[in-house]
Image: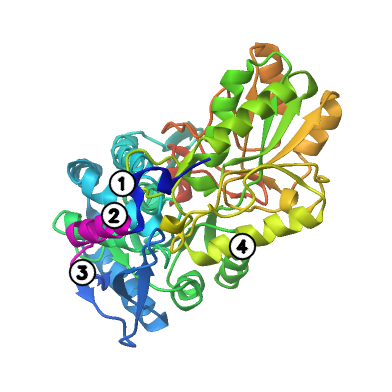
Amino acid sequence: MSSASDDVSQSKETILSRHREAAAEVVPDHTQMYIGGEWQAAASGETFDTLDPTTGEVLASVARGGAEDVDRAVEAAWEAFDEEWADTTESERQAVLLEIADRVEEHAEELAKLETLDNGKTLMEARIDMGSTAEQFRYFAGAIEIDRGQTESGDGYHGQVIKEPYGVVGQIIPWNFPLTMASWKLAPALAAGNCSVIKPAEQTPLSLLRLMEIVGDVVPDGVVNVVTGYGEEAGEPISTHEDVRKIAFTGSTTVGKQIMRNAADTVTDVTLELGGKSPIVVHEDADPHEAVETIAFAIFANTGECCEAGSRLFVHEDVADAVLEGLQGAAEGMTVGDPLDEETDLGPKVSREQVERTMEYLESAKEGGAEFLAGGDAPDDEALEDGCFVAPTLVEGLDHDHEAVQEEIFGPVLEVFRWEDYDEMIELANDVDYGLAGGVITNDIEKADRTARDIEAGYIWVNTWHEMSPGLPYGGYKQSGIGREMSVDTLDHYTQTKSIKYGLD
């Protein structure tokens, strides 16, 4: 593995200087909450620090919202809905979404650098995310034009089905793709005619705040309200609020279950995109070199902090040695270091807490008799000692029922299993509580189709990974969630269906 100290440009002093300079350029001026079109402090007056996971330094102090702030945001959202947004035409909402997309593209480099500072993802990955963010707003601007109503006539009657917005929706965003995940929720909600109370993750609040600085003159006051704070203090009040008619959440399965419980008390609709433990199935005809490229991208992209990361590898015995040798070389050859450096392959995890969580799983794997083909610890590099780094890791030899295999680690850790019998392999591939994604690597179209259909998951890749296209619904089976995002189907999750029957006699 290539480390930061291999390059003089990644000495500790250089990294600190580079990050401080970038922070001075891109950290937003406003780090309060955005409610009713105004920047407001928390009712408590409290703030919390958001940290740079590369250096450990404070980037900004952000308003620490609570239940009273959520009440204000919900009230502002309903006022905006009742007085203006509910009466907007499709073309007016379309114009807003398209302008948001344009401004994201205009400020893409600044927003990407901000997310790299706040989240730790590499600058290259952050740039891709900004393109995806703009794409979501542009896609749903177009989706507004699709007529999703129905009419039916019969003897003596005429029937009509229409779609109406909920009014005010609550949206809770994770830290791994802060602005992109916000766009996955905001774009369809606004397109459908709703107003939003949205909470970014406490680890990564800055890019959404900066977005509201950029588009505040485009989005009518109160249509989008940002409440920053911790999950228990700000997220919980959103998910229990009796005037929030719909909840959308991306995050852990544990929190998702609690949100479902909260929503049950008010019979509130939910969309949940939760955890994953996605299998990668490599058939015996696969080209080892091409397989290694796909697998490495599946697990190491975004430092493994992807819900759909390919974290369980099932590789056929005939190609296993070649594939694993290639993966070992790929892992050891990755440059781990400063995510603002263009040469870096793997940046830090988002927080010290996440590093500790990953290390607990790795220690458990060691106790379970695992063989570490690569990684298994933090990089041994003084330049990175203040950051939240974990080396890219390959693990073989664990029982499939081990907790490190069954549970989502959310880090650059791949568990490896060899197989010969297809039915036994598929049984193991599906033997987890999750079903968000999966993948197949083969040159045989029949094997690809069979395996894609046999994997119990909502999104399957063949000979690729992480590539998502608007229009293809994204979401999970089993405990990976409820509902779909990224497609016109998503508009149905942000509208209520009303039937009107006219008697003609």
Tell me the mark number nearer the camera, choosing from 1 and 3: 1
Q: In this view, does 489 lie above or below 326?
A: below
Q: Which amino acid does label 1 sit on?
A: Ser
- Confirm whether residue 404 shows in the render: yes
Q: In terms of depth relative to the viewer, which is nearer, 220 or 305?
A: 305
Q: What residue type is labelled 4?
A: Arg
Residue matched to label 2 = 14
- Confirm whether residue 306 shows in the render: no
Quadrant in the rendering for residue 98: top left
Q: In terms of depth relative to the viewer, which is nearer, 162 or 344?
A: 344
Element carrying mark 1: helix
Q: Distance between the residues labelled 3 and 4?
A: 32 Å
Tell me if 446 is positioned left or right of 45 in this view. right
How packed mark 1 is, by other alpha carbons closer than 10 Å (few <14, some 14-19, many 20 or more), is: some
Residue matched to label 4 = 357
Mark found first going from the N terminus, 2 or 4: 2
Q: Distance between the residues labelled 3 and 2?
A: 28 Å
Q: In terms of depth relative to the viewer, which is nearer, 170 or 378?
A: 378
Q: Distance between the residues labelled 2 and 4?
A: 29 Å
